[in-house]
Image (cartoon, rainbow, N blue to C red):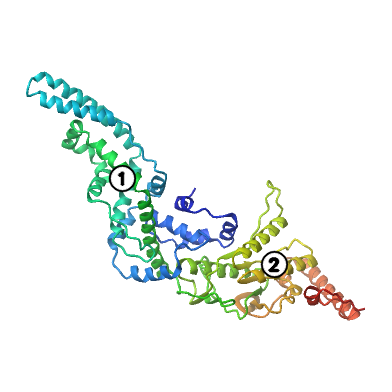
Amino acid sequence: MKNEQRLFEHLVKPNLFHTQTILDINLEELFNKIDYTSSAFGRQFFYKHLFEKHNSIPTDIIQNDFIQLSTKNNSGILKELEKCNNEDDYHVIDSIINSKHKFPNTTTVSLFSTILLIIGLLGLIIHFSFAILILISITLNVRSTSNCEKSFHEQINTYCAISRFINLAYLVSDVKTNAFKKELKKPRSRFLRLNFLFSESAIYNYASKSIFNLIRIIIPIDRIAYKYYITHLNSNTDYYIHTFQKIGYFDLINSIVEIQNNYQTCIPMFNDSCGNMKIIKGYHPLIEEYKTHSYIPVKKDSIITGGIMSGKSTFLKQIALNTIIGQKLGICFASEAFLPTFPVCTFMNSTENLLGGVSHFYSHLTRMKNIMQSCLKEKHIVIIDNTFKSANSSEQVAINYGIIKEISKLSHILVTTSDDDNLIKLFPNFNLYHINRTNFSDKKTYSGEIVGGTQLKNNTIDAAEELGMPNSVLENAKQLHQHINLHRKKAHSCCGSLINISSLYNNSSIILES
């Protein structure tokens, strides 16, 4: 398990359906690129917040806290956050939630040695022979202390990390946020002083404190402090989990500040009216030399067309990523954005599972079925890349038509791609866009601009020509393509209107004219 997944795994587990959307849009890669958190705690919280399906913290609250916290001087907290990046800091959440702290059972020995020490000291007034009791007490105390010290030093780095966390908890408890309105009481001052004994500066200077070591031999101070420390942690688990999340949230807000400093972003507006998604000059943050696109649909659903390798899939990912990031962080990689608040689900990639007996086509069907079932429970923004390419042309049109029509009815907004003109004609009420193609230096390239209308002519053959496919292959392909088109024209002219495809699906009767 990755370190940043620890908080996520403890507090919320993603289902397979949501995980597939995460893989489709490369959310893991995006997280690694835009993560500007200063601490292990912030990274864990950022990961959890970004990858869970529903927003645990409403976007408007994040936006308000962003304005409030980014204008204050929190340099002291940020310096402490930067110290919490060791491997052991990632395991603090494990230690707190699982209550792994165990105290060695030396209470009886400690009590007995203390009683002997008191009797021996008082007995010296009567006779010097009572000194033997003092020696026995010290012997028992040294043995007990070594056992306690062994148990402590087995987890020395863990306690150093917990000590850093508790210091942060003390500082962050003064920070007021809208997301964590519940007042967090500061740890008691005596516990904070005790916490110093478990910090790095105290632990690594133990050997130099000869006077303190002498006291440890006579009085069981280690066992008293250690037991109190562990008891406090185990009895305040809920408090420290809440504080852990508040620290992570504070770090996340500072990370959003850095994202805005390093990327062109905007603060989106939200509205759940159908068809009201709008992204002006949006771009994909994982592409270094990005091309901006403006997506301003008039109708609820859209079909995107364009040439092979024109960037249709990247454009869909851009819409999905900006919607998710807008909903989660309150920022978009665009100059202006108007978004719905419904969750996003996608279908862009499907993989076969040979060991599991799952074929590529069966994987397609399963994903589509899951999308429809999810939309029955809750409206979604559904983004689908071209599907069922392995089916023959007539079945591909038929199954895609049935699925797209059903998802359009169930979803809040649908955006899909298609390379089939017959399928596109079946959806006259959809927005139609394509990625425009222009000429540069007498060479056909894709400009990447999204414009209205469709563009399907010779996509595959043109792409093969650009990639330098042999002329013999291109000539044979072009000849056959012309022959097929000519045959279709003759068939239509001889038979008239064989089948009105729209009426085939929209009406129950089929009229054949000869």
State the residue at coordinates (80%, 75%).
507
Mark 1 or mark 2, which is nearer the start of the sequence? Answer: 1
Label 2 sits on a secondary structure element that is loop
Question: Residue at label 2?
Answer: 468
Q: Position of residue 100 (x, y in %)?
A: 39, 41
Marking on residue 351: none
Nearer to the camera, 428 or 10: 10
Say which amino acid is labelled 2: Gly
Total labels: the figure holds: 2
Position of residue 326 in the picture relative to residue 89 (left or right): right
State the residue at coordinates (72%, 53%).
359
Say which amino acid is labelled 1: His
Give the answer, above or below, for where 113 lies relative to 94. above
Name the outermost residue toward the right.
Answer: 514
> Which quadrant of the figure has residue 344?
bottom right
> Which quadrant of the figure has residue 14?
bottom right
Label 2 and label 1: CA atoms lie apart by 71 Å
> Which quadrant of the figure has residue 200?
top left
Nearer to the camera, 57 or 354: 57
Position of residue 82 in the picture relative to residue 284 (left or right): left
Q: Position of residue 73 (x, y in %)?
A: 28, 67
Question: Residue at label 1?
Answer: 232
Position of residue 455 in the picture relative to residue 487 (left or right): left
Q: Nearer the viewer, mark 2 or mark 1?
A: 1
State the residue at coordinates (52%, 65%).
286
**Quadrant in which the C terminus is drawn:** bottom right
Label 1 sits on a secondary structure element that is helix
* Mark 2 closeness class: few <14, some 14–19, many ≥20 residues within 10 Å: few
Q: Position of residue 452 (x, y in %)?
A: 64, 81
Q: Position of residue 122 (x, y in %)?
A: 11, 26
* Mark 1 closeness class: few <14, some 14–19, many ≥20 residues within 10 Å: few
Q: Are marks 2 and 1 in contact (CB under 8 Å)?
A: no
